[in-house]
Amino acid sequence: MDPIKDYIWSTFAFDSDHGWLSGVTHNLKVNSNTYQLADFAYPSHDEVGNRLGMDYTDSTGAVHHYLYGYDGFGRLFTDQKVGGYYRKYLYDDHGNRTQIRTSGDNGATWTDAEYY
């Protein structure tokens, strides 16, 4: 049986103060070449550990920035790709997510998706 030559692996980083996830990197090894597929950095968290942002570096080296907001119950309320989309999450009285409102890159139109 031949050994596995091609594989994907991930590495995880945690902040030293709280042990919260601070980054994930996904790599691909093909023969003797290693490629970074994606790198996710979570540079900041709120006081209970919710991520406030993410920096995503894709395989071309382009960096994409994301911001997150939470309501008083700690539920995801907004997420935004800086320079791109903006989403709002709506919940019912029981805390179940019921709707996502998404604006396009220009923010002029909204698209709704509902949960059943």
Image: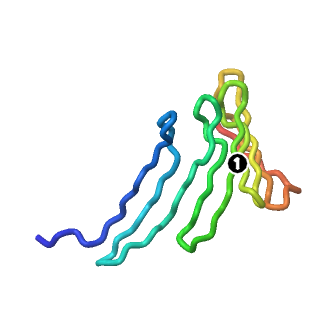
- Badge 1: how crowded within 10 Å, few (<14), some, or many (20+)? some
Q: Position of residue 43 (x, y in %)?
A: 60, 48
- In the picture, residue 83 is in which quadrant? bottom right
- The answer to whether one can see residue 116 in this image is no
Looking at the image, residue 96 sits to the left or right of residue 38; the answer is: right
What amino acid does circle 1 point to? Leu
In the image, residue 93 above or below residue 112: above
- The answer to whether one can see residue 45 in this image is yes
Residue located at (73% from left, 50% from top): 80
- In the picture, residue 94 is in which quadrant? top right
In the image, residue 103 above or below residue 57: above
- In the picture, residue 91 is in which quadrant? top right
Q: Position of residue 76 (x, y in %)?
A: 67, 37
Q: Nearer the viewer, residue 115 or 65?
A: 65
Residue located at (74% from left, 47% from top): 87
Q: Position of residue 101 (x, y in %)?
A: 76, 45
Name the residue tied to disc 1: 67
